[in-house]
Amino acid sequence: MYEYIIGKITYINPGFIALENSNIGYKVYVSNPYSFKEDEEYKIFLYQHIKEDENTLYGFKSIDERDFFLKLINVKGLGPKMALVLLSSSLDDIINAIETENILYLKKFPKIGDKVARQIILDLKGKLISKPNETVIKDDELKEALLALGYKNVDINKVVSKIDSSLPIEKRIKEALKLLLK
């Protein structure tokens, strides 16, 4: 199972992107391929879907987006391709539609009929956070920076919670380094 791949976008197709890493091109299905730019480097969080006749990578710009996708594919009658289509809208809009039982909003997506829309609401209502947790995203950014500097996860986890997440990333890194050097 892959967690993420950092690489350069070499090709954009209406349904997928080609992400090159170490001279290997990965075909990654994403909800909105045109939100990426060719010849730019991205960190893509992944879900690998394996069946008898299929081994497919689905990519996401954030962990929150991937986690929401994983919740969607656990809904009865909703597969990865249909879940990816739902993610072409904003997470907040989809979560709001689920929490307010807005079946009409969910049915506007291709292949989402009345039955699947009701099943999504039944399975996910009350189980979703209305907004992605900003602190977790900022903590992940800090952890990645410290990992890149060669620190171990165990040491990083001890100091990250002690740092004010409202500070700019540069100041958070400096504060973390001070704590790590003690």
Image: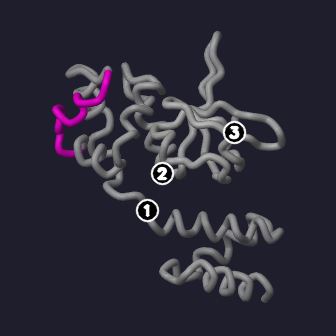
User: What amino acid does circle 1 point to?
Assistant: Asn
Q: Secondary structure at mark 1?
A: loop
Image vertical order of residue 115 relative to residue 93, above or below:
above
Three-letter residue code for mark 3: Tyr
Highlighted range, magenta:
99-110
Mark sitting earlier along the chain (1/3): 3
Q: Quadrant of residue 173?
A: bottom right
Report the residue marked by disc 3: 2
Taking the image as shown, residue 170 lies to the left or right of residue 128, namely right
Magenta stretch encompasses residue 106: yes
Residue at 74% across, 64% down: 153
Q: Of callouts 1 and 2, which one flags the residue occurring earlier in the amino acid sequence?
A: 2
Q: Nearer the viewer, residue 51 or 181?
A: 51
Which residue is labeled 1 in the image?
133
Mark 3 falls on what kind of element? loop
Cβ atoms at labels 1 and 2 below 8 Å apart: yes
Q: Which residue is mark 2?
A: 64
Q: Give the percent coordinates (x, y) of residue 113.
A: 24, 21
| Left or right, residue 111 beside residue 64 | left
Whole-angstrom CA distance, mark 2 to mark 3, is 16 Å
Asked if residue 175 lies in the magenta stretch, the reply is no
Query: How far is the residue under mark 1 from the one under mark 3?
Result: 23 Å
Q: Residue at x 67, y 49 (%)?
A: 39
Q: Is 131 located above or below residue 83 in the figure?
A: below
